[in-house]
Image (spheres, rainbow, N blue to C red):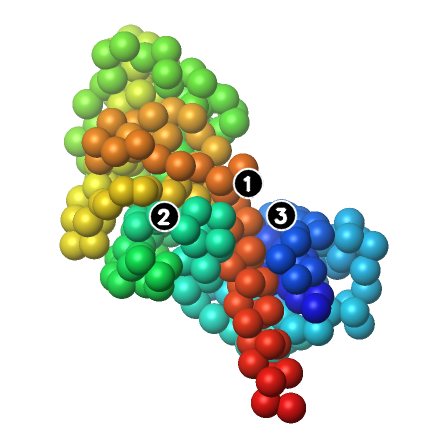
Amino acid sequence: MIVAGVDIGAATAKAVILSDDKVLSSSVIPTGYSVVMAAEAVTKEALLRSGLSMSQLEYIVSTGYGRRAVSFANKALTEIICHAAGVSSLMPQARTIVDIGGQDSKVIGLDADGNVSNFVMNDKCAAGTGRFLEVMAGVLGVEISEMGAISLLGKEPCQITSTCTVFAESEMVSLRAEGKSRENILAGINKALVHRIAIMGQSVGFREKVAFTGGVAKNIGIRKALEDGIGLKIWVPEEPQIIGALGAAILAKTELASLTQIR
């Protein structure tokens, strides 16, 4: 049983190829201007890495904001359901998922069976997303990949009061003019982003165990700030960006099994 999950996000496209319960390969590429082209490219790259061809895929589930653009998918499912399936497969004890991607963020509550019990999502504002960090990195002249390590050196995090990315950017400029260190500014940025997530997730609640997924989960500074902000230890998958695609592939396997039984 060979299936695939394809997750088309605003910033990146991800694909996972699954054979029974084994991940054969995965791929992550920038989404770019065309979600259709991104879907095809990321799937082909994952197939190339697994040594398979498109004709060998028995079922494909698409997810993410561009899921409807994956014309070759057999079914499209929401990223909320797919993230739950992906996290539960790796950490069945998880009861909360914090997912921060390039253009949105979400907090998902799970029940004992790994099903979604509640969720909240921010997809209308850049604050609390990877885009927020990209803007701030640009202002401070640092690479996005370096932000986490540098921020951990900040001992006196600056106070960032604006929840709007545009206004927060202005605060960055002012703090820089005041001579505040880059380390303390970055530490303040982390606290501001996590504060936004903490407020957003109040309606869902943060219950152990907490899984942290999405591209921003690779930022060690945000990971530390999130643990401090919610007062709980967090678990980060080995490859946090592909969890939605992994969940889509797992659900593709379930769908295929149901069809096989019907036949």
Number of dots carrying numbers: 3
- Going by the numbered disc 2, the residue's amino acid type is Gln
Regarding residue 42, the answer to whether it shows in the image is no
Relative to 212, say whether 141 is above or below.
above
Q: Which residue in the structure is indicated by mark 2? A: 93
The percent coordinates of residue 50 (x first, y second) are 77, 53
Indicate the amino acid at tag 3. Val
User: The residue tagged with tag 1: helix, strand or loop?
Assistant: loop
- The answer to whether residue 87 shows anywhere in this view is yes
- Looking at the rendered image, the disc whose residue lies closer to the viewer, 3 or 2, is 2
Marks 2/1: CA–CA distance: 18 Å
Q: Is residue 191 left or right of residue 82?
A: left
83 versus 189 height, above or below: below
Q: Residue at x 18, y 44 (%)?
A: 199
Q: Answer above or below: position of 61 versus 227.
A: below
Q: Which residue is mark 3?
A: 28
User: Which amino acid type corresponds to the residue marked 1 in the rendered image?
Assistant: Glu
Q: Nearer the viewer, mark 2 or mark 1?
A: 2
> Mark on residue 57?
none
Spatial separation of the CA atoms under disc 3 and disc 2: 27 Å
Q: Earlier in the sequence, mark 3 or mark 2?
A: 3
Left or right: residue 163 compared with residue 18: left
Quadrant in which the C terminus appears: bottom right
Relative image position of residue 17 (x, y in whole percent): 67, 58
